[in-house]
Amino acid sequence: MNSASKVWDAAQVRTWLERRFEASKLDQAAADRRGYEAQDDYDKAAAEEWVCRTLKAADCLNSQTTFAARIKDLIAQDEYRVTGIYDDARFQRNVRSQLRKLAKMTKANEGFEKTLRYQ
């Protein structure tokens, strides 16, 4: 079966973003409890939370092309403002990594059905 024949499901993408948003908040809390050695994990989870919060609030989810364009615009951004992180450069790198992952998923229209916490 060709993945191009798969129809874009905006509700499934919203569900995926919501579940990843909740999982990233839990990951941040767990990393925060572990302390200094988990600062990288905290920043990675904070980056995923930022990406999911930004995209789930956007009106572009109804169309695959507009969603892909929004992701591309976010990747082109110079910096991402957020407070409460440990390392700005690491956070910026993790945000771009999450956005590239989402761009690949959106282009292939695959992976949004995986809604389990650990992926």
Image (cartoon, rainbow, N blue to C red):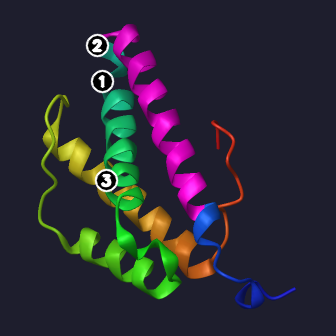
**In which quadrant of the rendered view does residue 57 lie?**
bottom left
**Secondary structure of residue under mark 2:** helix
Q: Nearer the viewer, residue 88 or 115?
A: 115
**Count of number-bearing discs:** 3
* Neighbours of disc 1 within 10 Å: few (<14), some (14-19), many (20+): some
Residue 20 among magenta residues: yes
Q: Which mark is residue 36?
A: 2
Q: Is residue 26 above or below residue 53?
A: above
Q: Name the N-terminal-most of marks 3 and 1.
A: 1
**In which quadrant of the rendered view does residue 98 lie?**
bottom left
Q: Are marks 2 and 1 in contact (CB under 8 Å)?
A: yes
Question: Disc 3 vs disc 2: which is toward the camera?
Answer: 3
Q: Residue at x 39, y 26 (%)?
A: 28
* Neighbours of disc 2 within 10 Å: few (<14), some (14-19), many (20+): few
Q: Is residue 88 above or below residue 105?
A: above
Residue at the limit of the structure toward the right, as seen here: 1
Which image quarter holds the N terminus? bottom right
Residue 9 among magenta residues: no
Range of residues picked out in magenta: 13-35
Task: Locate residue 9 relative to residue 22 in the image: left or right.
Answer: right
| Amino acid tagged 2 | Tyr
Alpha carbon separation for disc pair 3 and 2: 21 Å
Q: Residue at x 48, y 65 (%)?
A: 102
Which residue was labeled with disc 1?
39
Image location (x, y in percent) of residue 61: 47, 72
Which residue was labeled with disc 3?
95
Q: Residue at x 70, y 53 (%)?
A: 114
Task: Locate residue 107 relative to residue 96 in the image: left or right.
Answer: right
